[in-house]
Amino acid sequence: MSVRKAVIPAAGLGTRFLPATLALPKELLPLDRKPAIHWVVEEAVASGVETVILVLARGKEALLHYFMGNPSLKGRKLDSRLARWTEEVAQLRSRVELVAVYQEEALGLGHAVLQARSVVGDDPCAVLLPDDHFLPSPLPALVRGHDERGMGGLALRKVSPAEVSRYGIVSVKKADAPHFILDAAVEKPSLESAPSDLAIMGRYVLPRGFMRRLADGRPGALGEIQITDSLHAEAMEHGLYGYQFTGTFLDLGTWEGYLEANARVAGSTPDLAARLSNALANPPGPMPAA
Ligand code: UTP
């Protein structure tokens, strides 16, 4: 069976975007006009996904409202350049079944994914983290890897020695770059103990039956369930496919990365690029303290 379901975890606290995330889900912050949540749903659908399960936290319902359209706009004459955006969202919405589940406490990524178990069942599923933006998407390669090899798959990226201890890092059994067969995964290793410099990025294909493995996983000291532990068990038992991503990676998970991502995207649009370089050459000076 191919990959027809995708889980999008969006129940995190978003502390790196405080104070905006006191009221605003960070997954609604836009990259080049469209919110991060739009990009990942679109990416999933483009890879053949028919059902998207959004994992929400209380107070983050605006993520669902985004896809429902705004009744206050009904009957209003919008400039066609603006109407285009609401049409684009409605069109995306019409191409996918959206299901929301709740994660009542932010107990980690594995725990968030596990909340989708009642919808995913034993089926294979994709997982997309809205924080990570890839150009182009590595998901089609992961789906192909799954269908051809019968394995779960992970998007991988070579990271610098300074970054190794911030990511899940994989151990490689067989390499034919960009394709790898993995036999272990370790969460945030020290540089000395890291099995490679290939980090797990925010696109996964979880194989059939993986939810059972996640549910059986032992929670950490704070009750959190790390997905890397279950990926490790899967890699040891059945192997995992790794696809090394070498395109453009934009990190929307930190404030600095978010600003940089928007600047890079704006910089690739000719009229915005000129405006942006002019703006950068004319800073307003330090912002006054509140
Ligand atoms: P992050 O760790 O980057 O998001 O998780 P966060 O926890 O919201 O961020 P900070 O560290 O507080 O700034 C990546 C994705 O996984 C989701 C997040 O919403 C984000 O989309 N997530 C994370 C959950 O759904 N539940 C969790 O318990 C943790």
Image (tube, rainbow, N blue to C red):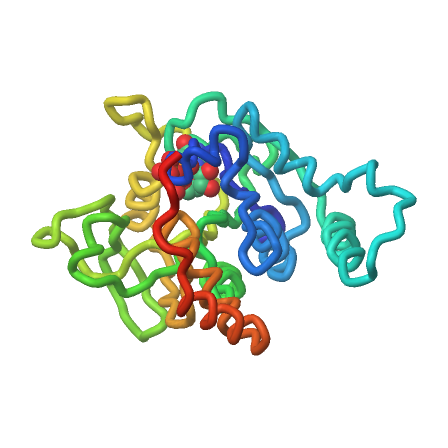
Identity of the residue drawn at 63% across and 34% down: 62
Residue 264 visible within the image: yes
Front residue of 175/35: it is 35
Q: Is residue 136 left or right of residue 74?
A: left
- Relative to 233, residue 79 above or below: below
Measured from the top left, where is residue 88 in percent x and y?
Answer: 74, 56
Q: Is residue 282 left or right of residue 92?
A: left
Measured from the top left, where is residue 192 in percent x and y?
Answer: 7, 53
Measured from the top left, where is residue 118 in percent x and y?
Answer: 58, 29
Q: Is residue 79 left or right of residue 128?
A: right
Residue 211 visible within the image: no
Q: Quadrant of the C terminus?
A: top left
- Relative to 162, residue 248 above or below: below
Quarter of image, ligand 1: top left
Count up the numbered dots. 0
- Relative to 58, residue 127 above or below: below
Q: Residue furthest left?
A: 192
Front residue of 237/219: it is 219
Identity of the residue drawn at 40% across and 69% down: 281
- Relative to 176, residue 98 above or below: above
Measured from the top left, where is residue 83 in percent x and y?
Answer: 80, 56
Front residue of 250/113: it is 250
Q: Residue furthest bottom?
A: 270
Q: Is residue 85 left or right of residue 181?
A: right
Q: Residue furthest right?
A: 75
Identity of the residue drawn at 55% across and 26% down: 102
